[in-house]
Image (cartoon, rainbow, N blue to C red):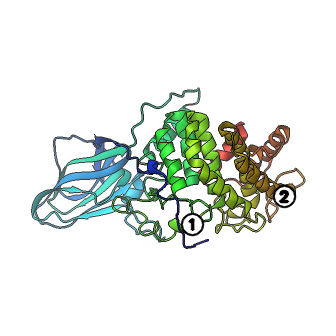
Amino acid sequence: MAIRDREFPWKDDYPEVRTSFELERSRTLPIRWRRVEDSDWRTFLPGGPIAGGGEVILDFGREVVGEFSCELRSPSGETVRGFYGECLQEALCEVPSSVGWFTIQRDEWQPGRGAGEFRSRARRAFRFVKLKLPAGASCSAPSALHEHYPVGPAAEFECSDPLLNRAWKVCVETTRLCMQQYYEDGVKRDGMLWLGDYRVQYLCNAYAFGDAALARKCLFLAAASQCEDGSLLACCCAAGGHQHPHRIDCMPGVPFRFQIKWDLLNYSADFLCGLREYVLFSGDAQILDPLWPCVERLLAHFASVNWAEVEPFADFITDNCHPASGNGYHSRPALWFLLRWAMRDLRELCALRGGSESARALAERVESALDPLIAGIARDARGLIVGPDEIPSWHAISMAALSGALPAESARALVTAAARADNILPTYAGFSRFYQQSAQFA
């Protein structure tokens, strides 16, 4: 991993990063509850306490992001413990995480003898809450203060497939929950603005909600996190797009250990593509002038890179790495095609803005370095792009088809052949699957 000391000379050049949105907050109640040892759920009645101690499960009926609170009464004053889960199994689990970059969501309260109101010590993301109550203790008025960026009703979608209709609703709600003060890549663990994740999230929002203001702030947060060499941080920590330490505690310490020092070339390319997509869907071409110095510095950085020698994970990440394959993180072809895609989008931005000769010249230098590498990419007998292990990679093929580097007929033939292949390496990361599906439906 490329961990380097960084300076951010343009950190204070973008006042837009200080935009603060009034989040939409609503008090949410459980819909049902049961004791852990029981199998039958009971309808939650707001008026009465849950008494008798023991382990109690509360079901809020949907994913909630925010603060949990309740009234506790404990005659013995013993500790009350709370465990949170996006699924029931997670809430029931008390085994500590075996990895250093994740801790389970849990709280402990010391009610003392008598009653008191207790709140989660950090922001939680959950549907289920398990409370471990001492003998004789009771819980009343459990609720969650649910919060997210304010957007109106989502666009409607309906087809003849009930499963697809349900998937649409789940995806829309997931997008909404990740819209906070910026696009968070995950509301439970990271809570950060990652450029690669932001790009997919904004595209989902563009169709579901059509909001532009949050994305505009995110693009300025990325520009304000530009390093002295012109690269962009993969996570926009330098400008404030980092996990809120006092509000999320599922990944303690990680943001300030390496995110503020880690740049990824493919995420920087996503910034250019994401800027073009923002302008396309929002119509806000005025954003180009204040961001153009950032764009030109990034292009100069790209022009200095030896694309044949970039190192996986240190310099780029394209997809989760399959344990038995040299593809995944090691897919330089996926990176090269993504860069080619970014240069295509840049040309559109140059045409929109006008007077961008220096940016065009830098883009030509990048393309001149990439084109011979792309021409030399290995293929199998079916014409499918393969990695060092000679297994075709869906992610590299998706990027090739979407990049514009291939004639339209060749791109369609490549995707068709990949869809028929029986030994192709699938995509694993969610944002990689987004591009695979985009290629297949193009």
For residue 144, side relative to residue 429 (left or right): left
Above or below residue 114? Residue 1 is: below
Marked residue nearer the N-terminal end (2 or 1): 1
Residue 386, percent across and down?
81, 58
Taking the view exactly as shown, the residue that stands out farthest to the right is 381
Which of these two is toward me, 214 or 299?
A: 299
Closer-to-camera residue (391/340): 340
State the image coordinates of residue 142 (x, y, percent, origin top left).
Answer: 23, 48
Is residue 194 visible to us here?
Answer: no
Tell me which amino acid carries mark 1. Trp
Q: Is residue 432 above or below residue 232?
A: above
Do we see residue 215 in this rendering? yes
Question: Which image quarter: residue 109?
Answer: bottom left
Name the residue type under label 2: Ile
Name the secondary structure under disc 2.
loop
Q: Is residue 440 left or right of residue 54?
A: right
Q: Secondary structure at mark 1?
A: loop
Quarter of the figure that contains the N terminus: bottom right
Q: Which mark is residue 262?
A: 1
Q: Is residue 101 left or right of residue 30?
A: right
Q: Foreground: 63 or 256?
A: 256
Judge the density around disc 1: few (<14), some (14-19), many (≥20) Cα neighbours within 10 Å. Answer: many
Q: Which residue is mark 2?
A: 377
Q: Nearer the viewer, mark 2 or mark 1?
A: 1
Residue 39 in picture, x, y percent from top left = 34, 49
Q: Nearer the viewer, residue 342 or 296?
A: 296
**Could you tell me how far apart the alpha carbons at marks 2 and 1 are, in whole angstroms?**
28 Å
Rendered position, 227 above or below 291: below
